Image (tube, rainbow, N blue to C red):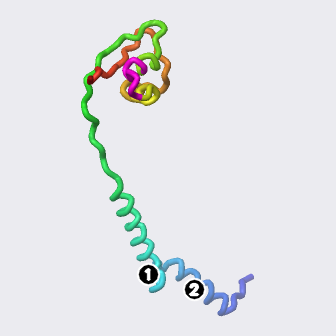
Amino acid sequence: MSAVVSIDEWRAARRQESASERPLRLTRRGRVVLTALVLGLMALVVLWGGKAFASGPGEPREVTVHAVEAGETLWQHAAALAGGDRDVRDLVDELMALNGLSSTSLQVGQQLLLPVDEG
């Protein structure tokens, strides 16, 4: 038994097949929107990129290497370096950064870099 297909159904099927084979074509409005999006993204990159800058390494500091003894804390070392005129908390942060520490806990025998007093 054969299937009967009307001319309209056949034409609709052909249009659908040929539409899937054709390349994408943008209308004028589509090109304008796409261009505006690209220009907007480029503007954002330029604005954000203009604020980004690379910083060089800080000034070199003279340091001494200290072997941690039992009972010593990072807070004690920072307080000794502060000398009463600097905030000890800031020095603790500096010592952690200088030594690559993720916490303030120290281990006996650990090598600790301490900045030399500049005064």
Q: Residues within 10 Å of mark 2 (few under 14, many from 20)?
A: few
The residue range painted magenta reads: 79-86
**Residue at point 38% right, 67% down?**
42
Mark closer to the chain start, 2 or 1: 2
In the depicted structure, whether residue 3 falls above or below residue 96 = below
- The label on residue 18 is none
In the depicted structure, whether residue 111 falls above or below residue 93 = above
**Residue at point 69% right, 88% down?**
5
- The label on residue 32 is 1
Q: Position of residue 53 (x, y in %)?
A: 31, 50
Q: Position of residue 110 (x, y in %)?
A: 40, 13
Q: Nearer the viewer, residue 82 or 19?
A: 82
In the depicted structure, whether residue 117 falls above or below residue 108 = below
Q: Nearer the viewer, residue 58 or 101?
A: 58
Q: Quadrant location of the N terminus?
A: bottom right
Q: Which residue is mark 2?
A: 15
In the depicted structure, whether residue 2 falls above or below residue 50 = below
Q: Amino acid under label 2?
A: Arg
What SS does tag 1 mark?
A: helix
Q: Nearer the viewer, residue 87 or 56?
A: 87
Q: Position of residue 11 (x, y in %)?
A: 61, 89
Assess whether residue 81 is covered by the magenta stretch.
yes
**Residue at point 36% right, 27% down?**
98
Indicate left or right for 7 with 65 as reference. Answer: right
Residue at the top extreme of this rendering: 70
Residue at the right extreme of this rendering: 1
